[in-house]
Image: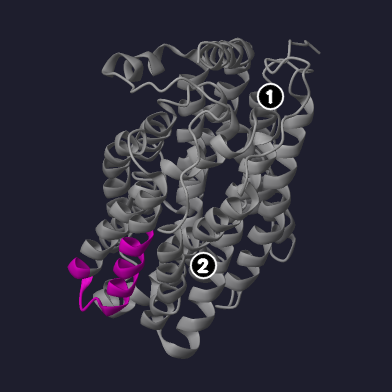
Amino acid sequence: MSTSTDPAGSTGARPPASGAKLSLGLLLSINLFNYIDRYVLAAVEPDVAKEFFGDQHSSAATLTKMGSLATAFLISYMVAAPIFGWLADRMNRWLLVGLGVILWSLATAGSGLASGFMMLLVMRLFVGVGEGGYGPAAPTLISDLFPVERRGRALSWFYMAIPVGSALGFMIGGVVAQHLGWRAAFYIVTVPGLALGVWALFMRDPRRGRAGATPHKATFGDYLALFKIKSYVTNTVAMAMMTFAIGGISFWMPRYLTEVRGLPAGSKTLFGAITVVAGLGATLLGGLIGDMLRGKVRGAYFAVSGFGMLAACPFILLMLWVPFPYAWGAMFVAVFFLFFNTGPSNTALANVTHPTVRATAFAVNIFLIHAFGDAPAPPILGGIAGAYGWDRSFYLVTLAMALGGVAWLVGARWLDNDTAAVSAKEQASKTNT
């Protein structure tokens, strides 16, 4: 295997900043409810469709409409993210996080109050705006709290909320809807979100870049320069393909299991449990392996991500072809490898961008991966399923995953040099202070 020089040098790992673990715990908790909220909707989607559309709840037109609920949320999220990312590079990030969490929590309660499809659609738009205030700022806070040597593991803990929160969303949505109705599923996650949002307002914003970097307000040219970073561009392309796959699978899986494969409603809970165990293990292990291989394997974070994505592809197809309960095993392996890239890919995103533009870099990434990923995925896959069958939809998901894996492997050749260039700039700015 090829080796590369560790951009951090041989000075040894620096300790995290003061209060880093508390901040990480709060951000992890917020991210957990972020994904719980997203996938409560996916869990109750069949019930919502039956109430709002009656006998037409399984038609191609209805499937496309219900898929647009996820798209509406993602459109507002990806449009708001660059605006809030620009603000996060210039003002107190915890303030943006707190206000964003409070807004999306109130909109979640409004989702439960929706009297019709259009009101629910508007509430999901407001959820997206709230998450747009949180999404770009949170990973940059972690990047400033933890040194580059430990950043992968710290971000993996943060992104652990994706599989765990998603799974809890499926479980909460399925269980609560079964006993109290689908509206109660939204109400039950509102109060914890509001409490976490208020707590965030009292947190202290850490110094950007840590250890005395020279203050610098990013210019428009700095933002354009992001697209000259080859590893940033290839990472964004790969993450868009991954997001298309995860967004599409997650939104439609409850309906696929119950209406296509004929499983009972309790299968949503089992799918949630698989997502927790496989996704949690993969997210933490991927970040740990990426950190361990950093400096030893060329483009380690991308190599780990690409391997995981390609390894998941055959198991998605196997899930379609084998009967249950054996298909659960294929699904477990697919989910495991699908989440293997989460920590490494986001760590690479932080490592190749300077602290002064990092929030905007994450915001631009958020915009692009959702615009070409999970924003179009639910209505596209729902429309294909309604017209041609669910197998065709999953074939498209598998193709997107394969393209993402190849993009990461191609980008591995540039990642170390891009990381080293940013580290050199940070060190130069500290030396000049």
The residue that appears at 65% across and 51% down in the rendered structure is 21
Q: Position of residue 97 (x, y in %)?
A: 39, 52
Asked whether the viewer can see residue 318, the reply is no
The residue that appears at 47% across and 45% down in the rendered structure is 138
Instruction: Establish if 336 lies above or below 34.
Output: above
What crowding class fits label 1: few (fewer than 14 Cα within 10 Å), some (14-19), or many (20 or more)?
A: many
Q: Is residue 113 magenta?
A: yes
Q: Is residue 109 left or right of residue 374?
A: left
Q: Amino acid at mark 1?
A: Ala
Q: Is residue 153 left or right of residue 65?
A: right
> Residue 94 — which label?
none
* Furthest residue in direction bottom, as rendered: 179
Q: Amino acid at mark 2?
A: Gly
The residue that appears at 27% across and 73% down in the rendered structure is 110
Question: Which is nearer the N-term, disc 1 or disc 2?
Answer: 2
Q: Which residues are magenta?
A: 101-119
Q: Is residue 194 left or right of residue 4?
A: left
Q: Secondary structure at mark 2?
A: helix
The quarter of the picture where the N terminus appears is top right
> Which residue position is annotated with label 1?
303
Asked whether the viewer can see residue 330, the reply is yes
- Toward the viewer: 329 or 59? 329
- Toward the viewer: 247 or 253? 247
